Image (cartoon, rainbow, N blue to C red):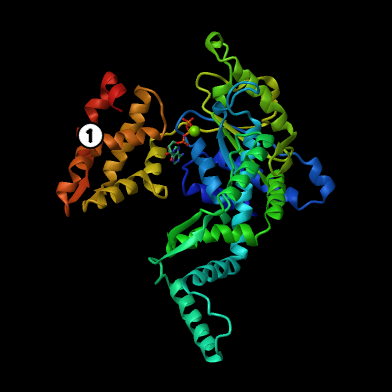
Amino acid sequence: MNLTPKEIVEYLDKYVISQNNAKKTIALALRTRYRRMQLDQELQDEIMPKNILMIGSTGVGKTEISRRLAKMMRVPFIKVEASKYTEVGFVGRDVESMVRDLVVASIAIVKAEKEEENKEKIENYVINKIVEKLLPPLPTGASESKQDDYQRLLKSMEQRVISGEMDDKTIELEMDKINIEFNDTNLPPEMAKVQESFSKVFSQMNKEDNKKEVTVKDAKSLLKIEASSKLLDSTNINAQALERAQDGGIIFLDEIDKIAVSEKSQGRNDPSKEGVQRDLLPIVEGSSVTTKYGVINTDHILFIAAGAFHVSKPSDLIPELQGRFPLRVELESLTEDTLYKILTQTKNSLLNQYEALLGVEGMKLTFEDDAIKALAKLAHRANEVTEDIGARRLHTVIEKVLEELSFSADERNGEEVIITSELVHEKLDIVVEDDDLSRYIL
Ligand SMILES: Nc1ncnc2c1ncn2[C@@H]1O[C@H](COP(=O)(O)OP(=O)(O)OP(=O)(O)O)[C@@H](O)[C@H]1O
Ligand SMILES: [Mg+2]
């Protein structure tokens, strides 16, 4: 992962409009990690990541930025909701499990890479196994000419399996060979080990009667799993994955404001929230977490926290935690113009989605530019008069405009429908201008 900050921002620009500060800060943080990895070990150890706190009201793109990053990057990355965790000792997930999840994500990445490297080997294994099942072996002591024939048969069968010609045939597979992986990271490592040995015992026990009829097509994917567990060195993969998570891992901690305890509402706050914050401290600062795959040090994991902070403020977090997120970025509220751009300039924008969906019914939907402007304007207006829910307002607004069309689309196969600004205003004006109505409808 050695994209320059500019490249990262360019990528994000395709999906997230404006919010340049946030994009830049994150891009820079990612680049800094790359730079760090180029240094010698001693200096590497000294350079700690600067964790980021993204602040912005609801629906302005905080989660979207992270979602897109996760898709783009080949570094171990997970997104978790802070509100999901509970203090150690309470029932629920403890915060250390997020580090374990990161390791699992990392294993998936490394494994996929290894599978790609050994693609041919794995494919050969799969094909050979299937051919073996389809062609009974030649009896020993067969004549030479028979053996030649057999070889030819084998080759042609291989081709037929590869081409998918045999996909519908069924064969019998011994399922016990297929490793069922237990990756429930919710369990503490000691428990996970117990569970693993259980699953081993069970698979031994069932060895005899675990033959299963499957189609060649299914066998291909089942055997692929078997092949990768047999041919790839899982110890090595786990070790590499652990290292990668440790040096390059990113944990996106969403909804962090939900664990802040604001002074106003202290009375009815869940006391365990502060506990979760306290549990987070050592992990964010750097500590060792035991996982099923080994011990991982969290010193160099980058944390990006995000929250709307509507009810609470960043200063409502316990000071130690605030201090561990030195970089603050604020995301701007969305203007009418931004909303317009979100509709017109993002890849797979909402409008494209609706066009595609109604296209399935044979209806050709087009939005006039004026109509899109009107949508943006009314969405912005609705955000002003009621709550500001950011770009999510676009969903409700468009849904309202297209409601009837969408309902009867199947009856209007082959029709071309143009959405004009008149239609938009007709559907929305009364609703937007009436406070009470818009509270219920939009
Ligand atoms: N700046 C933006 N550019 C493009 N799309 C956006 C932008 N902001 C929000 N959206 C869209 O709006 C929806 C909600 O955005 P997102 O999930 O990022 O909100 P959020 O900031 O995480 O809000 P919350 O605090 O409620 O979690 C998504 O579908 C996203 O695609
Ligand atoms: Mg969010």
> Badge 1: how crowded within 10 Å, few (<14), some, or many (20+)?
some
Question: The C terminus lies in which quarter of the figure?
Answer: top left
Q: Which of 145 and 49 is in front in this view?
A: 145
How many numbered marks are there? 1
Point out the residue furthest to the bottom here.
Answer: 145
Residue placed under numbered mark 1 in the picture: 425
Q: Which of 394 and 146 is in front in this view?
A: 146
Where does the image place residue 377, in percent across and percent down from the top left?
32, 34
Q: Quadrant of residue 190?
A: top right
Point out the residue furthest to the left here.
Answer: 411
Against 328, is 278 above or below? Answer: above
Question: Ligand 1 shows up in which quadrant of the image?
Answer: top left
353 to the left or right of 272: left
Against 41, is 329 above or below? Answer: above
State whether residue 27 appears in this view.
no
Against 23, is 415 above or below? Answer: below
User: Ligand 1 closer than 8 Å to the CB at disc 1?
Assistant: no
Where does the image place residue 386, in percent across and percent down from the top left?
36, 22
Residue at 61 percent across and 41 percent down: it is 26
Against 435, is 168 above or below? Answer: below
Identify the element where label 1 is drawn. helix
Question: The N terminus lies in which quarter of the figure?
Answer: bottom right
Look at label 1 and name its amino acid. Answer: His
State whether residue 293 appears in this view.
yes
Where does the image place residue 83, in percent across and percent down from the top left?
55, 26
Q: Which of 398 and 232 is in front in this view?
A: 232
Where does the image place residue 10, in percent across and percent down from the top left?
53, 51
Point out the residue furthest to the right here.
Answer: 42
Q: Nearer the viewer, residue 130 or 65?
A: 130
Residue at 62 percent across and 34 percent down: it is 187
